[in-house]
Image (cartoon, helix red, strand yellow):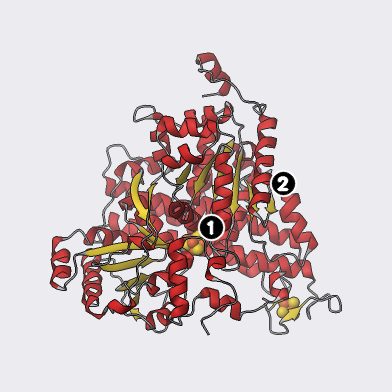
Amino acid sequence: MAHSSKKPSERVWDEASLEMLVKAEREDVETCHTRMDAQHNQCKFGTSGICCRICHMGPCRITPKSPLGVCGADAHTIVARNFLREVTGGTAAHSDHGRHLVLLLKKIAQGKASGYEIKDEQALRRAAQLYNIQETDRKAADVALDLANILLADFTAQEETLKTLTLAPVKQQKIWDTNQVAPYGIDRMIVESMHRSTMGVDHDYKNLLMQAFRTSLADGWGGSRIATMVSDIIFGTPMPIRSDANLGVLGRKTVNILVHGHEPELSDMLSIAIKDPQITAYAKAAGAEGVTLAGICCTANEILMRHGIPIAGSFLQQELAIVTGAVEMMLIDVQCCMPSLPQVAQTYHTEIVSTKAIARTEGVTHIEFDERNALESAKQLLKRAIDNYKNRDPKKVAIPKKRTPLVGGFSVEAIKYILGGKFRASFRPLNDAIIQGRIKGVVGIVGCNNPKTKVDAYINALTLELVKNNVLVLKTGCAAIASAKEGMLQPEAALEHAGHGLKEVCETVGMPPVLHMGSCVDNSRILEAATEIVLEGGLGDDISQIPAVGVAPEWMSEKAVAIGCYFVASGIDVILGQPFHISGSDKVTSFLNGEARNLFGASFHECLEPEQAAAKIIEILDAKREKLGINKKQERKLYDMQDRRALGV
Ligand code: BF8
Ligand code: SF4
């Protein structure tokens, strides 16, 4: 039953996953790979987007013999409606996460969230300035309360565009206004998208797709941007930090606790709680040497960035982590947590604990995390995991050796700092390196893994090729974890793999050629970085002019569809390694892959192979460089005052 048609080595790239997949097969444990096989050929109506089940006259499927649904909807309407609903789902996920953080900030400001504090007051004051909140001579709590209220208004605004949009370059905002895609309140956008895509409302595929872009902007420049900003205020703005990645981070003789999901409230508190000597003493009394905390998926990215807590694995390692037989507890919150986890855990002693009322799974223990009593709540969970250590079965334990060192923590603040130092923190050196041709451009590689293809294979092949070609790679999400496991997040990777120009830049500042910028909501950091590049000058006055591209190589989530759309609407071309479910409509396909360019200066490109993607990316970067008049290697030039004035800096 658990044996699959493909060999494990055709499924996964890294050794640790391979070992665990073989073990899972041996122990007859099902994983997403075996279930993918059981799905056989996935439904063509679904993959081409022409299945509609929006009303109960259906479900309707479009075929040459039945080109219209019962209501008369054609393939274009159906594909566009389905697409809009995916973007809306993704936007809702990121934004609801953002909302929880703003509500937490508000509680902290009101003194109602014991255990939490404003860790980064500078980040709070920087944010306050961006929103024109008076912050000098005022207490942090008062400023935080004002900020929280303004951000909450970005969720509820009815006929005002998002305040957070004003953080984008001015010309970008004009482009959105011209195209009428500047979103109103985040919640309103989500409700309106659901309304417009229900039976009998919006049928014009273009109108629907424009709403998809508009909704996605409420994610990237709304919910996600807010989530990142507020996380930095509450938990600290990331700075470069060392750690390790892959299943080898699990301890042989320690109690292993994995945090999995997305929201940092609990995981951050656990990172603090494990340092308590009482907890270590409790673990020792249970016969262990201590406690190991590690992360899966984006929770891993959140606590890596701020605490250096190691990454156990990415999305498609969540089941394999349990297969090690060495995990006492896996805590799950929201998003990307597979409902299969309790089934995998049945073979081992792992206790799966859900912690959020909105995210429950049958067969797992539910312990609601109490924000008002956060530290105590976190300690209770740690003790419960320690109590489970006695149930570990040594015969079932096999922890892979593989763990790879990494440097993460590249927030925009951190990048400015490493480029310019404390007193001259700025993007200027990066812009100069791009203008001089030492760096060809900047590419964000983001998103998930997908068992449809060999895990990490595309991500790693493309990353290497780009780095060789002097492209600075920015990473988030599970794509960042792939690079972490591959050793590409170490400064040494530049010496070994980078092209001459990129190597020079990385060596000078001591940074890796691939920068880990955080979780998936932190894709907003990539937008922020793009904005900094524009503001720094010399590379155009809106994001579509800078040599930058986004890639989602092995994506699977609705969230990735939303991210892709807000990148395109922000002027960044997006390469997809997995196609959207839109092939059933030539009109939708040509709008997203072509006409969008006339509106935003960017569009989607399907490249199913990494070599094809690399070639396309280099073509796009060269074309942008050509337009900017910098497509030749220039000698390093020191800017004098006159040059700076000419650039408007
Ligand atoms: O939000 S990259 S598999 S963990 S969806 Fe999920 Fe995809 Fe990973 Fe993070 Ni992002
Ligand atoms: Fe069929 Fe139209 Fe109903 Fe969709 S909305 S299920 S196409 S009748």
In the foreground, 508 or 80: 508
- Local packing at callout 2 (Cα closer than 10 Å; few below 14, some 14-19, many 20+) is some
Q: From this viewpoint, is residue 124 visible?
A: yes
Is 586 left or right of 477, judged from the image as shown? right
Residue under circle 2? 597
SS category of the residue bearing label 1: loop
Is 164 left or right of 276, judged from the image as shown? right
Task: Between label 1 and label 2, give the one nearer the viewer.
Answer: 1
| Residue type for callout 2 | Arg
| Residue type for callout 1 | Gly
Residue 264 quadrant: bottom left
Is 261 left or right of 564, judged from the image as shown? left
In the foreground, 227 or 12: 12
- x, y (%) of residue 434? 56, 31
- x, y (%) of residue 247? 38, 63
Residue 374 quadrant: bottom left
Residue under circle 1? 447
Is 38 left or right of 387, judged from the image as shown? right
